Image (cartoon, helix red, strand yellow):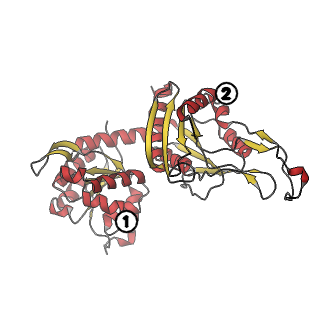
Amino acid sequence: MSVKNKKILLIIGGGIAAYKSLDLIRLLKKNNNDVKAILTDSGKEFVTPLSITTLTKNKTFENLFDKNSEADIDHISLSRWADIIVVLPTTANFMTKLSLGKAEDLATTVILASNKDILLVPAMNVRMWIHKATQKNVKILQDYGYLFLGPEKGEMACGEYGEGKMASPRQIFSYLGNYFNKKDLFKKKRIKALVTAGPTREYLDPVRYISNESSGKQGYEIAHALNRLGIKTTLITGPSNLISKKEIKTKKIISANEMFEAVKKCLPVDIAICAAAVADFKPIIKSKTKIKKDNIKCKSIELERNRDIVEFLGKNNKHRPSLVIGFAAETENLNKNAFSKLRQKNCDLIVVNDISKKDSGLNSDYNRVSIIDNSGKIKVIKKNKKSFIANAIAEIVLDKFLINDRSFN
């Protein structure tokens, strides 16, 4: 897969594999891509600014404070200019800096200030790669949303063999081609998605309500993940303290009925992911004044069912999305109950999480889920950050959507 007419920012790290960056630049330039590069101090030990400038036809950036260009605020302007940032080779030391959120030079500052996807291409000795500290950093960076390519197995410069060899320039070039192909495809098709998130509140009187512990974190992360894929995303959220990205159209609601009406107004869409913890019931009568505790008439509260948003979408003959994904929060018989809901609501996928676990689920940064499709196939994702799970869900949704939507074939 070829990548053409894109703006690629390379960050060249300090490793013997840095010389491969020159071949990658040649490949990118040959296909009419605009390339700029940041050369780290360690990278200068292996390649020179002159060789990079000669190939990119652009200035090679080296210093955080450059009196000749700081008026442009390079650590901001470079990130905003690029379509993607590629770090190669990504050393163990550089990953440590990123996992700690350091901004001590131009390269780390650009990354921390970036609003673009960042592809890390690791290269190091096999023992360094498999070390627990390195693998911990990899997991942290994946949770943050960094993309990884490699490392590969092979013979390394030190003479040892194993996992730690940097992906080849052609592998990186192919990866970038696939990355942009997906984004360009969705932009061209103008794919739309809606995501629901957070709790709803069903008021008994002006101050009391029925609700749950949902924070909205999983739904917000899913909306962000879809947005990164180039999908035009609308987020419909119940009460939450979270802030969505400005590129994501966000509608704030309070009650289940308000969420239902907001979802209806969003149709038609191509993808619907219902991650909100919508209250199943609401009081039949809402008191206009605060209910007093000595009110004899309020010994019991009569409830009625709210409309089921997922079922409405799944069985919508007029505007059914190509993909409808529901969520099921369960405390027992997880997969059995979730699969029953999938069939009942006519979903394509259902994501079930165990809310009996105190270290994940509602109002937590972590989740552990199983994703079930309508054939009964189950993909288990062990406890991880909700951002990681959102990216995994987005990739599954992407693959499923491309298969299901005949217009892509």
The image quadrant that residue 317 belongs to is: top right
- Mark 1: secondary structure: helix
Q: Is residue 168 above or below residue 290?
A: above
Amino acid residing under circle 1: His
- Mark 2: secondary structure: loop
Quadrant (top left/top right/bottom left/bottom right) for the N terminus: top left
The alpha-carbon separation of the residues under discs 1 and 2 comes to 48 Å
Whether residue 323 is visible: no
86 on left or right of 406:
left
Of badges 1 and 2, the one in the foreground is 2
Amino acid residing under circle 2: Lys
The image quadrant that residue 76 belongs to is: bottom left
The image quadrant that residue 66 belongs to is: bottom left
From the image, tell me which residue sits under label 1.
Answer: 75
Task: Name the one closer to the observer, 295 or 277.
Answer: 295
Q: Residue at x 67, y 37 (%)?
A: 309
From the image, tell me which residue sits under label 2.
Answer: 318
User: Whole-percent x and y of residue 79?
Assistant: 39, 59
User: Whole-percent x and y of residue 13?
Assistant: 24, 58
Q: Is residue 84 above or below residue 93?
A: above
Q: Residues within 10 Å of mark 1 (few under 14, many from 20)?
A: many
340 on left or right of 1:
right
Q: Earlier in the sequence, mark 1 or mark 2?
A: 1
